[in-house]
Image (tube, rainbow, N blue to C red):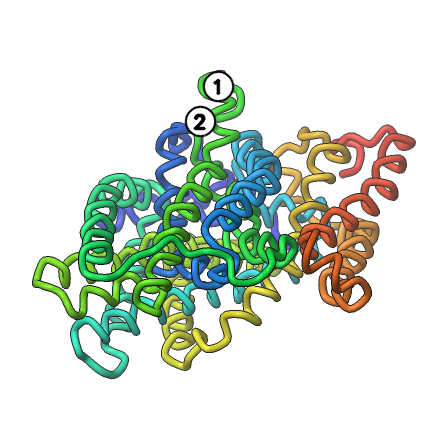
Amino acid sequence: MNDSSQSVSEPRPSGILGEVETVGVQPVPDSQRTMSPGKMTIVWLMASASATTPLIGALLFHFGVADMILAIFLSWLIGLIPSGLFSEMGREVPLTGLIVARKSYGTAGAFLFSILFTFVNMGWFGLNTAVAGVTLNAITHVSGSLWFWVIGVIQVFLVLFGMKWLEYFYRYTSVVLLVCYGMLAYLLFSRYHVQMPGATMPMQWGTAISTIVTFSILAWTYKVSTVSRFARPASDPRGKSAFFFAPSVGIMASVLVMGLMGMYSQQATGNWNLALIGAHAPIWGVIAAIGVALAIIHTNAMNLYPSTVDLLVALNTLRRPSKWEQPIATMAMGVLGTVLAILGILNHVAGFLDVIGDVIIPFTFIMLVDWIWVQRRQTPAADFFAQPHTAHDWWNWPAIVAFAFGLIISIWGGEWLPSLFTTVLPLPVVGGLISAVIYAVWAIPRALSKGLGPQSEA
């Protein structure tokens, strides 16, 4: 691995090329770290508010409105601290999470996770593109893959310009999205017989919370620092608490509102996808439906962007970065994700969500234990790019073993105690907590006995 902690020293082009983001995995310059808590909240609100989010209402439909709302609230409480800590991580050291994972899992471990999460994010990109394409095909009565490619190209174009312009896009299109959803909600309640969906089966808290956290807050958490590295540094005292809460509030507010809309749409029309109402509505309803379908861009930009950055982390393990590798990777990931949408990833959504929770939650919880109690939030940015010299630099076995235990519990724990993990406890969260405890018991005493600071370990 080559040291890439220094920016590539090439002259910045003028015009539109000068706005293309090329920072890659390097530390974000202080001049670009200007995002406020309010802007960060809007980024995550819009990233979570997509045409796919109402699917939560269909997945939890049989549990009824009241229990779904409570399950969303409990899911927010579960994800609040992890997402807040990752938000602070990005402000303390302006790097993406998988670069920080080089100290948590070793350089080789972080490399493997980077490859895995590149494809996870690309899968999300394909899933959301598929929903938008199917919806727009139905509204406009067009068949084939035209809309899939239109959505894919728009998303790639936006992500090329990076977080600065994505934040502008989220901020100034948020009102459009709210108006479009409001128009469709009016159509739903004025044209259909809408009733409050009640429970038709006993509440399964473990299943419901697992669905929500893997669909939303804990699936996003490790990506939070990829955004917060552009926020005001932790040394800036303004809005510290607000930065901590901003990601989780933005994500879960969208899940709550969109989940309710999806559940009511499922009850009234037999389909969770509210945008499909526009296919049989006046022209303003069609326009609103197209606007909601295009809102998939909000979410997918935050799938394609981390997918690109995760790929760059893997590449950086092997070679020194080049200036234009970020936009090239963005275009490549966008094309592959669009192909996944066309090939039918939407038909495999349930299994895809299970895999996400099984892997990401233990990974995330171990990283937090390492960052807070082993690294003690003190590792300088340059240390994450240092050439590995020892076996521990390449593989942090306590973290790898703890992750394996958490993964085993997440995959097979339901076979050992099916009733407990269906009706009471969310299995992926339990697996993640157990992996975090194993790592803490193993790694923290070793770090303390060695007087381990980041500088002494390097």
Q: Residue at x 42, y 64 (%)?
A: 125
| Residue under numbered circle 2 | 232
Q: Residue at x 38, y 42 (%)?
A: 45
Quadrant position of the N terminus in the picture: bottom right
Q: Is residue 289 left or right of residue 390?
A: left
- Where disc 2 sits, the SS reads loop
Quadrant position of the C terminus in the picture: top right
- Can residue 382 be spotted in the picture? yes
Q: Residue 317: horizontal and vertical position, in percent? A: 62, 57
Q: Total number of numbered labels?
A: 2
The vertical placement of 50 against 103, above or below, is: below
Residue 56 falls in which quadrant of the image?
bottom left
Q: Residue at x 56, y 60 (%)?
A: 117
Q: Residue at x 50, y 59 (%)?
A: 60
- Can residue 317 be spotted in the picture? no
Give amino acid for label 1: Asp
Q: Check if mark 2's residue and mark 1's residue have beta carbons within 8 Å.
A: yes
- Where disc 1 sits, the SS reads loop
Q: Residues within 10 Å of mark 1 (few under 14, many from 20)?
A: few
Q: Nearer the viewer, residue 18 or 125?
A: 125
Mark 2–mark 1 Cα distance, whole angstroms, equals 6 Å
Q: Residue 185: horizontal and vertical position, in percent? A: 24, 52
| Residue under numbered circle 1 | 236
The vertical placement of 113 against 245, above or below, is: below
Q: Nearer the viewer, residue 166 or 84?
A: 84
Give amino acid for label 2: Arg
Q: Is residue 261 left or right of residue 186?
A: right
For residue 420, the mark is none
Q: Residues within 10 Å of mark 2 (few under 14, many from 20)?
A: many
Residue 422 falls in which quadrant of the image?
bottom right
Q: Residue 23: horizontal and vertical position, in percent? A: 43, 45
